[in-house]
Image (cartoon, rainbow, N blue to C red):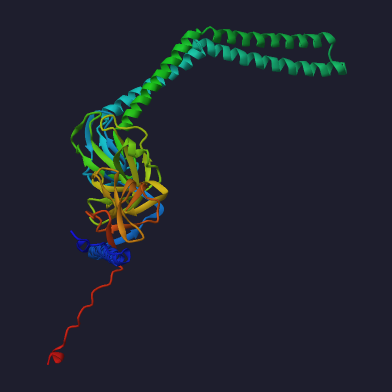
Amino acid sequence: MSEDDVIEDPPIWKRRPVQIIAVAVLVLIIAGWCWHRSSAAAGDEAAQPIVSVKLAKAEVGPITQPLDLVGTISARQEATISPKVSAQIAQMGLLKNRVVHRGDVLAVLESRDLTAQQAEAAAALREAEIGIMNTGSGAIPLTNAQDVKAVRDAKGTVGNAEKTYERRKALYEQGGISKKDLEASQLDVAKAADDLRLAEKSASLHRDTTNPSDLATARSKAQQAAGHLAALQAQAGYATIRAPFDGIVGEQFLFQGDFATAGTKMLTVADTSTVIVKAPLSVEVAMHVHAGDIATIQPDSLPGVTLQGTVSLVGSAADPQSRAVELWIALPNADGRLRPNSAARVTVNSGGVANAVVVPAAAVTLDATNANAGTVMVVDDKSVAHEVKVTTGAHSRERTQITSGLHGGETIVVEGNYGLPDGTKVQNADAAPKPATSKATSPAEKD
């Protein structure tokens, strides 16, 4: 090969433009690829749907836990009237649904035998009292009378002797009688005084001859007779049956002419001027209910009527069979429209929390119907909804307490949150512009 055939490499200054062009082309390719990616991302972002939802704020405030219960309306006081003695009903009208007052006669039982026994017992008591008098006065009435006469005569002799002595003493001082006569009169006074003391002592000895045990026996018989008479008087009083308090006669089991056995039901009386709604609740729930809590009552017998009341009593002991505690709510019933033994729906506001994070109940999607955990869709400042796990506490029909997961002030989804994917862009349905509606053209405009 000749030297002329040898091809020499071009100088470097001739090769550099080619390299520059290659680098420029590479830069253009990379820039185009980046622009394509950004355009695609912007297109994807522009293509991402925006879901219209309703929003609200998680607030901090008080909330109460309403308890829905089923209660029974009962009279404030109710009594079953039963006779205490067995006898035929002599007088008793038709008393069912009749208004009665305390002390009104409801029935009268046959009591002629009790009246006769009462008279016999009264006579026995009088006889026992006479026995006490005779026993205490002495065993021999004639001796007692003689003793009384002897004491009375002795007192008279003493009086006469003293008067005679006073007269003779005056005569002696005037010189009318001798000293011997005066001394004889003084001796008569002393003798009469001795006779009086003897008579009094004799009477005392005669009275003391009575045996103390005989007197105690006589008094005991008198007490027995008095007790027997009192028992018969009480039984005679039981023959008249009276109303124990103001109220209405409910049921009447016996009527005039029936034989009433002691202890059997005759009729019932109920005071319905005030009624008590009694509802059972569990021991755990009862720990959060207190006397004075507000309650609403909806009687089944009065559709559409809602009454307000307060809890008057929370039972301190549970029923051994149902393991439930009884709740009492007192309601006035002057017009009598609340009927005893009818049912009522009771709602008690209890378990209140002063400063709680509260959201609308629709904002929480619970894991289960009886669970206290669920999710809330929280919207950030870019209008993107994020799923947040929360724990619930007290709740009502409209609001729910959030015990963990929220702090208050967050924007949350309250409508449209069910099935909403995490990371979805949302807008407030209340703030979204409404599409313009075209005006309806009038017939004149059509022409």
Rendering coords of residue 317 (x, y %): 35, 32
Vertical arrangement, residue 351 with respect to residue 196, above or below: below
Vertical arrangement, residue 226 with respect to residue 264, above or below: above
Q: Quadrant of the C terminus?
A: bottom left
* Residue found farthest to the front: 2
Left or right, residue 311 beside residue 15? right
Q: Nearer the viewer, residue 423 or 88?
A: 423
Vertical arrangement, residue 435 with respect to residue 29, above or below: below
Rendering coords of residue 176 (x, y %): 85, 16
Rendering coords of residue 431 (x, y %): 31, 68
Q: Nearer the viewer, residue 163 or 424?
A: 424
Left or right, residue 127 beside residue 167? left
Q: Residue at x 37, y 38 (%)?
A: 287
Q: Nearer the viewer, residue 435 or 189?
A: 435
Q: Nearer the viewer, residue 196 or 362?
A: 362
Residue 138 in sight here: yes
Q: Quadrant of the N terminus?
A: bottom left
Left or right, residue 357 beside residue 301? right
Residue 274 in sight here: no
Rendering coords of residue 291 (x, y %): 40, 43
The mark total stands at 0
Q: Residue at x 34, y 61 (%)?
A: 382
